[in-house]
């Protein structure tokens, strides 16, 4: 009950959001920005409804994502394929989000994300 939401994102890898952190940030008078997986995003939206803005950021395609991950040179091919498979699954959730931003160009995606948040906070 200490967590607002949690999920086993990869086998044995759990991520979650502590309610106490949410309350601490709100008490300081700040808005909260979550960086969560799609299941966490959907669950947070269910809890807060119109009081929350859910934004789904995706690569232009699975192949572009694969090439970006390969280009980073930080993960094994096995890990890359695991991440790509997860991304394919996560893309099926896009229609459950308020805003979908395609990260085809980082500068453009950033402007779109900032505008969505700014508009929501008004």
Image (cartoon, rainbow, N blue to C red):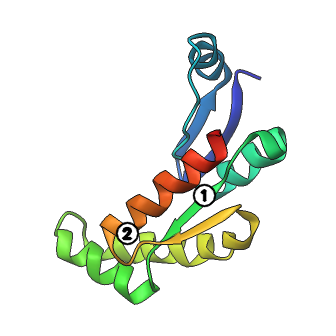
Rate crowding at label 2 as few (under 14), some (14 to 19) or many (20 or more) other CA atoms within 10 Å: few
- SS label for mark 2: helix
The x and y percentages for residue 111 are: 41, 60
The x and y percentages for residue 70 are: 23, 77
Q: Quadrant of residue 42?
A: bottom right
- SS label for mark 1: strand
- Lateral position of residue 42 relative to residue 110, left or right: right
In front of the other: 42 or 53:
53
Vertical side of 103 occupied by 50: above or below: above
- Lateral position of residue 81 relative to residue 71, left or right: right
Q: Reading the chain from its start, which is encountered first: label 2 or label 1? A: 1
* Residue at 53%, 69% in the rendered image: 101
Q: Which marked residue is nearer to the observer: mark 2 or mark 1? A: 2
In front of the other: 111 or 62:
111
Q: Quadrant of residue 2?
A: top right
- Circle number at residue 87: none
Q: Pick out the residue farthest to the front.
A: 122
Vertical side of 49 occupied by 31: above or below: above
- Lateral position of residue 25 relative to residue 19, left or right: left
Vertical side of 2 occupied by 6: above or below: below
The x and y percentages for residue 54 are: 66, 53
Asked if the residues shown at circle 2 and circle 1 are in contact, with their CB atoms under 8 angstroms apart, the answer is: no
What quarter of the picture does the C terminus occupy? top right
The x and y percentages for residue 103 are: 41, 72
Q: Which residue is mark 1?
A: 55
In front of the other: 91 or 83:
91
* Residue at 52%, 48% in the rendered image: 12
Q: Which residue is mark 2?
A: 108
- Lateral position of residue 82 relative to residue 10, left or right: left
Q: Label 2, label 1: how many angstroms apart (C-alpha)?
A: 15 Å
What quarter of the picture does the N terminus occupy? top right
Rate crowding at label 1 as few (under 14), some (14 to 19) or many (20 or more) other CA atoms within 10 Å: many
């Amino acid at each position: 009950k200490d967590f607002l939401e949690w999920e086993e994102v990869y086998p044995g890898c759990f991520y979650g959001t502590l309610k106490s952190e949410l309350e601490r940030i709100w008490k300081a008078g700040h808005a909260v920005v979550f960086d969560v997986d799609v299941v966490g995003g959907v669950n947070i939206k269910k809890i807060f409804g119109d009081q929350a803005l859910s934004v789904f950021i995706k690569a232009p395609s699975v192949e572009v994502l694969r090439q970006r991950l390969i280009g980073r040179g930080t993960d094994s091919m096995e890990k890359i394929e695991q991440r790509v498979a997860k991304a394919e699954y996560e893309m099926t959730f896009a229609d459950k989000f308020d805003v979908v931003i395609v990260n085809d160009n980082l500068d453009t995606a950033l402007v779109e994300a900032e505008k969505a948040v700014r508009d929501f906070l008004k």
